[in-house]
Image (cartoon, rainbow, N blue to C red):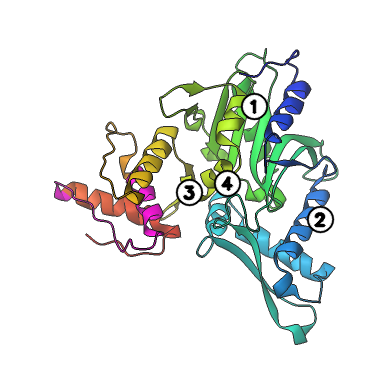
Amino acid sequence: MCKIPRNDEATIEKHLIDVLGQGHNQWNYREDLKSEEDLWRNLRQKITQNNLSEIKEHPITDKEFDSIKMELLTHTKTPFHAAKWLKGENGIARITIEREDASLGAMSLILYSNQDIGGGISTYEVVNQIAKRKTDDERERRFDVTLLINGLPIVQIELKQAGAKDGYFQAFNQIKKYAEEGMFRNNIFSTLQLFVVSNEKTTRYFANALPKNMDRKFLFSWRTTDNRKVDNVYEFCKQVLNIPDAHRLIAHYTIVSEDHDNRALMVLHPYQIHAIEALFTSAMKHESGYVWHATGSGKTLTSFVATKLLARKSGVDRTIMVIDRIDLDSQTTSEFTKLASDFNTGISS
């Protein structure tokens, strides 16, 4: 476990950024990015780098980038819409706009890829103390630490002093307040998928949601495969927010659920993630195994995500669930249907 001489918030933040930047191919600290305008400019550079074959010798104009911004904000009106867009078609999130020069037609631009985890077009950057105002008249807000993938804010980390009583709850309340103020809506931060709150000694994570749906009961602690709780924020970052695991967490283990007017983004518990990864490893070796979880532990969701990941592998045409009761069959089919909005396949019973 890492130790630092002081426990004030600024020192924790600095050490956290150092930890995120350790090792090969880790988060690149961008000290030069300090405002929302800086983040938009950085995103424009990423889009250009990743779409040279589409842009060709005609750089993106200011008017075209304004269109890109408008399209992005249209796709990310709520955390649910943002998550669904980031899942993309075949794991690729795109935006298509008409070129300012009509003779050039339209261009389809890749903004985010769930296929390139830890490589390919994906870039990983960390920024801190981003200044944000909803209006010019309002008090300036500063976000502690933000993780960018391809220039898009994906993970937000809010920190409190180690000595603060219920510090991580204070951090959670602050995030909820920011959400109520609209700080994560209709701007570049509307792509956020995951929040992490910590007072250095206790760390929790939760999926982004509308303010009315943000609740303490959705704060999860991380546990290792042997069920050891990981509370220290630096160890949490090493285990959960490293590259490629942070990107994999967003790509594979955040789920959009759609049931009439009830639309939500969910993130899995650690025991579900460990079970799926163990199942997946065994399946790739053509070995048998089983997952034994208690009633109410989310077995249907676990089986859905496992099915989704297996279906992406060549040679896997279908998965079969054997259920011993008709009512359970109907319930499982209904749950799978709600979860399948980002899953292009048929479900039958």
Magenta stretch in the rendered image: 302-326
Local packing at callout 2 (Cα closer than 10 Å; few below 14, some 14-19, many 20+) is some
152 to the left or right of 227: right
Establish if 70 lies above or below 253: below
Establish if 297 lies above or below 63: above
Q: Do the residues labelled 2 and 1 touch (CB within 8 Å)?
A: no
Establish if 136 lies above or below 75: above
147 to the left or right of 229: right
Q: Which mark is residue 247?
A: 4
Residue denoted by label 1: 171
Under mark 1, the amino acid is: Ala
Under mark 2, the amino acid is: Arg
Q: Which mark is residue 252?
A: 3
68 to the left or right of 235: right
Secondary structure beneath dot 2 equals: helix
Residue denoted by label 2: 41
Q: Residue 317 carries which label?
A: none
- How far separated are the C-alphas under marks 1 and 3? 26 Å
193 to the left or right of 348: right
